[in-house]
Image (tube, coloured by chain):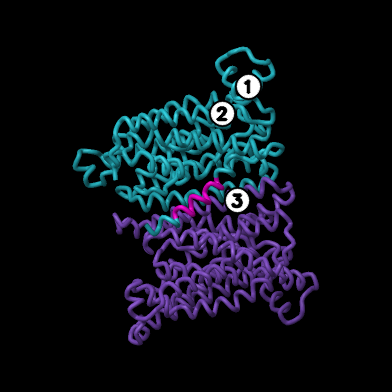
Chain colours: A purple, B cyan
C-alpha cells in the first residue's frame, strides 16, 4: 500500500520515470512517422499536420504510417497491461499470456477462421479469440495447485501452448499454399499493412478494457498480500481473480485478432516497470506499464521496419529474439536465490 | 513414492506389454492403403512365402516405418522419463531440452541453404538435425547453469530458448516461403515416407542412446532421493544431472532428426508408465520405453486407418491426445 509519505518521498523519482517514458514514447512515435518512402523531415511532417505537404506524402503518413503507429501503441499498452494484471493476480513472475496459453488459444481460433474461410464478421473475430484465449488460460490455471508454483505453471502452460500450436499446424496442413503463406505471416505477429480498419477493430476493446484494468489496481494490491489475508480483508478472492483473468484475456484477444501473437511484451514490461520504479504497488505499476508497453512495441516495430529495409521482418520475431533472452537475464537472479522453492 | 511391486508382477507386466507391442506392430504393418491380413504379415515377417507384391509392400514400405515408430516411440518415452527425474516434475517433456527446436532449426537451415536436396534428402539431413539438437540442448544447459542447477531455471530456460529458436526458424521460413510446406511436417512430426535409408541412420544412435539411458537408471534413482540425500550418499549431483540431461538431449535430438518434433509423447508415456510401475527408475525407464513405442505405433496405425487419401501427420494425432490428458490433470487437482 502506498502511504502518502511514500508518495511524497518518491514523487520526484516516480515522475522522472514517467516523464522519461513519455518523452521516449513521443520520440519513437515521431521517428516512426518519418522514414520510409518518401523520407520525411520534421518540418515536412509539421506541414502535413497543418494540412500542407504533397498529396503522396499526406496519403502515406495519414493512411499508412499513422494507423500503424496508433495500432502499435494500443497493442503494446494492452499487452503490457494484461501482463501486469496476470502477474499481480496470480502472484507469479512468469504469468504472461504467452506462457499461460492465452495467446495460443486466441491464435488457434483466428487460424481456424483464416484456413477454413469461416463466414465470420470482422468485428466478431476478437470475441471468438477471447473464447479461445479463455479456454487456454483457464485449463492451465485450473491445473495449478498453488498460485506461486512457477514450475507447474510454466510446464502446463508450455504443454497447453504445444497442444494449441499443434492444432494450428493441423489446420495449416489442410490449407492451400496461399492461405498458408498468409497465415504464417500472421502467426509470427506483425504490424505491417495495418490500416484504420484494424485500429477501429481494436479501439473499442481498448477503450472499455483498459480503464477497467486500471481500476483493478486496488484489489491487485490486496491480492499480493496472499489469499488468506485478502479473504480476511473482505475481498472475494476467486471472483476477483476470475474477473481479472477475463479482463486480461480480453486485452490480449483483441490484439491477437488484429496483429497476431506478439510475444514477450506482456511478460517483460511489468518486470521492467517494477525494476525502474522499485515498487510493486499496482496503483503506480499499472499506469506506468501501459506507457512502457506502448513505447516498447512502437520502438520494436520501428526497428522491425528499418533494420533490414526494404526487407521487413515482422515485429513478433524481434520481440521474441530480444525479449526471450532479456527475460531470462532478468529472472536468473531471482530464481537463483529462491532455491528449492518448487 | 516408490511402490513396492513384486518381481513377478513386474515381469508379468513386461511380458504382457511386449505381447501388446507385438500385436500393435503387426497391426501397424497390416493397415494401410492396401489392407493385408495379419496372418499374411506374420508369415511375411518370418520369411514364409507370400504373394510377391505383398512381400514388397511389407518389407520395403511398411516394415521400416513400423521399426522407426518403435524406436522413436521408445526414445521419446525414455527421454521424457529421464527429464522428469532431473526436473523433479512429472510434467517435464523432452521439448524443454531445447533439442527439438534446435534440431528443427538446423534442418530448416539445411533445407533452405541447400535447395538441391528437397523433400526427403537422404542421410545427410538427419545428421545436420542431430547436431542442431545437441547444440540446442547444450545452449539450454549452459544458460541455466548458475554454480549449480535449479530445476525451475532449467525449465524456464528451456521454454524461453525454445521460443527464441522457433522464431529463428520463422525468420528462415519468411525469407524462403517455398519450404513452408516441407517444414510443416517437421514441425509437428510425421512418419510419412520413411524407408530403410532413415532407419539406417536412426538405429545406431537409438542403440547407443537407449542403452546409455537404461544404464543411468540406478543413478537416477539416487537423484530422486533429493539433492541433500544424494550428495550424502556420495553422488556428484551436478555431474549426474549433466549426464542425464545429455542422454535425454541425445535421445530427443536423434529421434527428432528422423521424424520431427513430436510433442506429448515424451510427457504422456512416462506418466502412464509411472501409474503402472511406480517411480523406481530401474523399472520406470524400460517400461516407459515400451509405453512410448506402443502409443506411437497405435497412433500411427489409427491415423493411417482413418485418413487414407490424405495422410495426417502422426504428430497431429498425438497432440490431440493432449486434450484428455489435460482434462485428467484438471480433474486430479482435487484429490
Q: Are marks 2 and 1 on the same chain?
A: yes
Residue A167, labelled with which disc?
3
Please state which of residues A167 and B255 is positioned toward the viewer in this rendering: A167
* Residue B304 in sight: yes
For the residues marked 2 and 1, what is the alpha-carbon distance in whole angstroms?
11 Å
Is A22 included in the stretch rendered in magenta? no
Which quadrant holds the N terminus of chain A? bottom left
Instruction: Provide the chain ID for the residue under circle 2.
Output: B
Q: Residues within 10 Å of mark 2 (few under 14, many from 20)?
A: many
Q: Which residue is mark 1?
A: B60
Q: Which residue is mark 2?
A: B66
Residue found at x 55% / y 48% = B166
In the image, taking residue B259 as reference, residue A281 lies left or right, namely left
For the residues marked 2 and 3, what is the alpha-carbon distance in whole angstroms?
25 Å
Q: Residues within 10 Å of mark 3 (few under 14, many from 20)?
A: many
Residue B232 image-quadrant placement: top left
Local secondary structure at mark 1: helix
Is B328 included in the stretch rendered in magenta? yes
| Magenta span of residues | B319-329
- In the rendered image, residue A313, in percent from the top left (x then y), is placed at 63, 55
Residue B224 position (above or below residue A142)? above
Q: Residues within 10 Å of mark 1 (few under 14, many from 20)?
A: few
- In the rendered image, residue A211, in percent from the top left (x then y), is placed at 54, 80
- In the rendered image, residue B285, in percent from the top left (x then y), is placed at 38, 35
Amino acid at each position: 500500500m502506498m502511504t502518502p509519505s511514500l508518495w511524497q518521498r518518491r514523487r520526484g523519482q516516480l515522475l522522472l520515470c514517467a516523464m522519461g517514458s513519455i518523452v521516449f514514447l513521443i520520440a519513437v512515435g515521431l521517428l516512426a512517422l518519418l522514414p520510409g518512402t518518401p523520407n520525411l523531415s520534421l518540418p515536412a511532417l509539421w506541414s502535413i499536420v497543418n494540412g500542407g505537404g504533397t498529396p503522396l506524402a499526406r496519403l502515406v503518413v495519414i493512411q499508412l504510417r499513422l494507423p500503424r503507429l496508433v495500432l502499435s501503441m494500443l497493442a503494446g499498452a494492452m499487452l503490457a497491461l494484461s501482463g501486469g494484471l496476470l502477474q499481480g493476480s496470480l502472484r507469479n513472475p512468469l504469468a504472461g499470456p504467452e506462457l499461460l496459453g492465452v495467446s495460443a488459444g486466441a491464435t488457434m481460433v483466428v487460424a481456424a477462421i483464416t484456413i477454413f474461410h469461416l463466414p465470420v464478421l470482422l468485428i466478431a473475430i476478437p470475441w471468438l479469440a477471447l473464447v479461445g484465449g479463455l479456454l487456454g488460460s483457464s485449463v492451465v490455471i485450473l491445473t495449478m495447485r498453488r498460485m506461486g508454483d512457477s514450475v507447474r505453471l510454466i510446464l502446463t502452460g508450455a504443454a497447453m501452448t504445444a497442444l494449441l500450436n499443434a492444432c494450428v499446424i493441423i489446420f495449416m496442413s489442410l490449407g492451400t499454399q496461399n492461405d498458408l503463406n498468409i497465415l504464417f505471416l500472421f502467426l509470427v505477429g506483425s504490424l505491417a499493412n495495418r490500416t484504420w480498419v484494424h485500429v477501429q477493430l481494436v479501439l473499442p476493446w481498448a477503450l472499455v478494457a483498459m480503464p477497467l484494468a486500471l481500476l483493478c489496481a486496488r484489489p491487485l494490491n490486496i491480492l499480493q498480500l496472499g489469499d488468506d489475508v485478502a479473504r480476511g480483508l473482505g475481498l472475494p478472492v476467486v471472483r476477483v481473480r476470475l474477473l481479472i483473468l477475463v479482463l486480461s484475456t480480453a486485452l490480449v484477444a483483441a490484439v491477437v485478432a488484429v496483429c497476431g501473437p506478439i510475444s514477450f511484451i506482456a511478460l517483460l514490461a511489468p518486470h521492467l516497470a517494477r525494476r525502474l520504479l522499485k515498487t510493486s504497488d499496482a496503483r503506480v505499476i499499472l499506469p506506468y506499464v501501459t506507457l512502457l508497453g506502448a513505447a516498447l512495441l512502437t520502438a520494436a516495430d520501428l526497428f522491425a521496419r528499418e533494420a533490414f529495409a526494404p526487407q521487413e521482418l515482422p515485429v513478433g520475431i524481434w520481440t521474441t529474439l530480444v525479449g526471450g533472452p532479456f527475460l531470462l537475464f532478468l529472472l536468473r537472479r531471482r530464481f537463483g536465490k529462491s532455491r528449492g522453492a518448487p | 513414492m516408490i511402490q513396492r511391486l513384486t518381481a513377478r508382477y513386474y515381469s508379468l507386466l513386461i511380458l504382457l506389454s511386449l505381447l501388446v507391442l507385438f500385436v500393435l506392430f503387426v497391426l501397424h504393418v497390416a493397415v494401410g492403403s492396401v489392407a493385408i491380413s495379419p496372418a499374411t504379415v506374420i508369415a511375411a515377417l518370418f520369411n514364409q512365402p507370400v504373394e510377391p507384391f505383398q512381400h514388397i509392400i511389407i518389407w520395403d514400405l511398411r516394415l521400416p516405418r513400423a521399426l522407426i515408430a518403435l524406436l522413436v516411440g521408445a526414445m521419446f518415452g525414455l527421454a521424457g522419463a529421464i527429464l522428469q527425474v532431473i526436473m523433479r516434475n512429472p510434467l517435464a517433456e523432452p521439448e524443454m531440452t531445447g533439442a527439438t527446436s534446435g534440431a528443427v532449426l538446423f534442418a530448416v537451415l539445411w533445407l533452405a541453404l541447400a535447395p538441391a536436396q528437397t523433400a526427403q534428402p537422404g542421410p545427410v539431413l538427419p545428421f545436420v538435425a542431430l547436431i542442431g539438437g545437441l547444440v540446442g540442448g547444450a545452449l539450454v544447459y549452459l544458460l541455466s547453469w548458475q554454480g549449480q542447477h535449479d530445476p525451475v531455471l532449467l525449465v524456464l530456460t528451456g521454454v524461453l530458448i525454445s521460443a527464441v529458436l522457433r522464431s529463428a526458424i520463422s525468420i528462415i521460413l519468411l525469407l524462403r516461403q517455398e519450404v513452408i510446406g516441407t517444414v510443416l511436417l517437421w514441425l509437428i512430426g510425421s512418419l510419412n515416407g520413411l524407408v530403410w535409408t532413415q532407419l539406417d541412420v536412426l538405429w545406431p544412435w537409438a542403440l547407443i542412446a537407449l542403452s546409455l539411458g537404461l544404464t543411468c537408471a540406478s543413478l537416477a534413482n539416487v537423484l530422486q532421493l533429493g539433492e541433500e540425500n544424494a550428495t550424502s550418499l556420495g553422488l556428484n549431483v551436478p555431474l549426474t544431472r549433466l549426464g542425464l540431461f545429455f542422454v535425454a538431449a541425445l535421445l530427443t535430438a536423434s529421434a527428432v532428426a528422423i521424424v520431427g518434433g513430436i510433442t506429448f509423447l515424451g510427457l504422456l508415456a512416462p506418466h502412464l508408465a509411472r501409474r503402472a510401475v511406480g517411480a523406481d527408475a530401474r523399472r520406470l525407464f524400460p517400461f516407459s520405453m515400451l509405453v512410448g513405442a506402443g502409443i506411437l505405433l497405435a497412433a500411427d496405425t489409427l491415423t493411417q486407418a482413418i485418413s487414407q487419401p490424405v495422410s495426417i501427420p502422426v504428430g497431429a494425432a498425438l497432440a490431440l491426445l493432449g486434450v484428455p490428458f489435460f482434462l485428467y490433470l484438471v480433474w486430479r487437482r482435487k484429490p
